[in-house]
Each structure stands twice: as structure tokens, then as C-alpha cells.
Image (cartoon, rainbow, N blue to C red):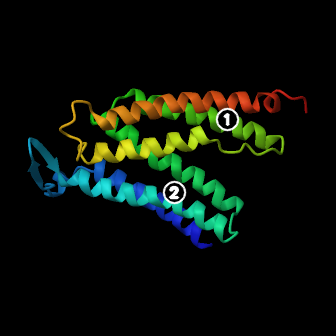
Amino acid sequence: MNLPTKLTVSRIIATFIVIIILIFPFYSIGFQWPQFKVGTIIISLQYIVAGIIFVLASITDFVDGYLARKNNQVTDLGKMLDAIADKILVNSVLIILAYKGMLPIIVPVVTVLRDTFVDAIKMQAASKGKVVAAIKSGKLKTATLMIGTTLAFFYNLPFELIPINVSDFLLLIATVLSVVSGIQYYLLNKELLFANE
């Protein structure tokens, strides 16, 4: 297993750590996450710790691909794990944070539906021996989602005094990009999808 693939695997492991931090009932073992106040905002260390791990995991998403291309270490296993790691990291965190009321429910709903739709296109293409290339709007969607989600973890700091919720704003932009990129994936590959065998 090369270094880029190891980074991808570490992202999957980090995702499960974030999930545990967010949903495990720590009070049941007598542990209470410390809280502190920043201005008028009461911040739980639980979300700060989970947010830091999320940021580090998100960074590996860019580093592993860069290293794989730079060192000519792109493998089918690496590409498959990278796609899985991205979806586990982003979608699971979006669902949990939406459930906790920290971001709009429309964000994970649209994101998961879009990813399912695009994955279906990719699988159909693969069954015909073709590869569906990534597109810029999809990459921009992922980057915007990660930035918006990071701000949600950190209570919108340092933008808490701005009249709009920057995290929600970015996540709603990412939601629009999810729809746009999903449509683009379809339009770019519809001839392949409906081509006769």
C-alpha cells in the first residue's frame, strides 16, 4: 500500500473517530465535554475536537491525490478508496450535524441523492468499460461543502458577528453546486449511458 492510499485509509479511520465523538453518549460513562464562552456563543469542546479531526481528514483528500499524481502512484484501489472515503467523510458528518440542528436538512438530503445519482452513472459507465472523469463543478462542490461544514463545527467563528450565517450560506451554495454538477454529469455522459451494447 503506497503513501497516498495510506492517507486515504487514514481519512476513513478519522471519519469514524469524528462520528464516535459526535454521537457517542459520553455522559453514560460519566464524562462531560468542557464548554467555554466566546462572546455570546457557548462552545462545546466536543465540536471543536471533532472539527479539528474533520479538517485534518479533509486536507488528506487533497494531499493523497496530489501525491498519487506527482509520484505516479495512481492505482485502481486508491481511486476506489478515495471515492468511498470522500462520501463517508462528508455525507455522514452532514447527516449528523443536520440532525443536531447545526445546518439545514436540505444539504445532506440533496448531497446524498446527488452522490447516489452520480455513482449510478459511474457504475453504468464502468459496466461498459468506460471511466467517468471528475468535473470542476463537482470538485468545487466538495471544497465548498468541506469549508461550510468546518465553519459549522466551529460555530461560524470568526464570522459570528456577520448578519448572515456564513456556514449555512456556503452549504447552500454547495447544495446548488451538487444539483448543477449532477446535471452536468448526466449531460456529459447520457450518450454513453444510452448507447447500445
| Residue 30 position within the rendered picture, expressed as x and y whole percent measured from the top left | 13, 57
Asked whether, in this view, residue 171 is left or right of residue 158, the answer is right
How busy is the neighbourhood of tag 2: few (under 14 within 10 Å), some, or many (20 plus)? Answer: many
Q: Residue at x 34, y 29 (%)?
A: 104
Q: Is residue 147 left or right of residue 28?
A: right
Nearest the eye: 52 or 32: 52
Which dot, 1 or 2, sits closer to the camera?
Answer: 2
SS class of the residue under badge 2?
Answer: helix
Instruction: Please name the amino acid that badge 2 sits on.
Output: Asp
Residue depicted at 36% across the width and 43% down the height: 149
**Image quadrant in which you'd find residue 42:** top left
Give above or below for 154 relative to 161.
Answer: below
Horizontal side of 178 relative to 171 (left or right) equals right
As helix, strand or loop, the secondary structure at mark 1 comes to: helix
Q: CA distance from mark 1 to mark 2?
A: 22 Å
Quarter the N terminus occupies: bottom right
At horizontal 33% and vertical 33% (from top left) the residue drawn is 168
Query: Where is the C terminus found, in terms of image quarters?
Result: top right
In depth, the one of 50 and 145 nearer the eye is 145
- Mark sitting earlier along the chain (1/2): 2
As drawn, the label of residue 61 is: 2
The answer to whether residue 70 is left or right of residue 114 is right
Circle on res. 90: none
Q: Residue furthest right?
A: 197
Residue ID for mark 1:
120
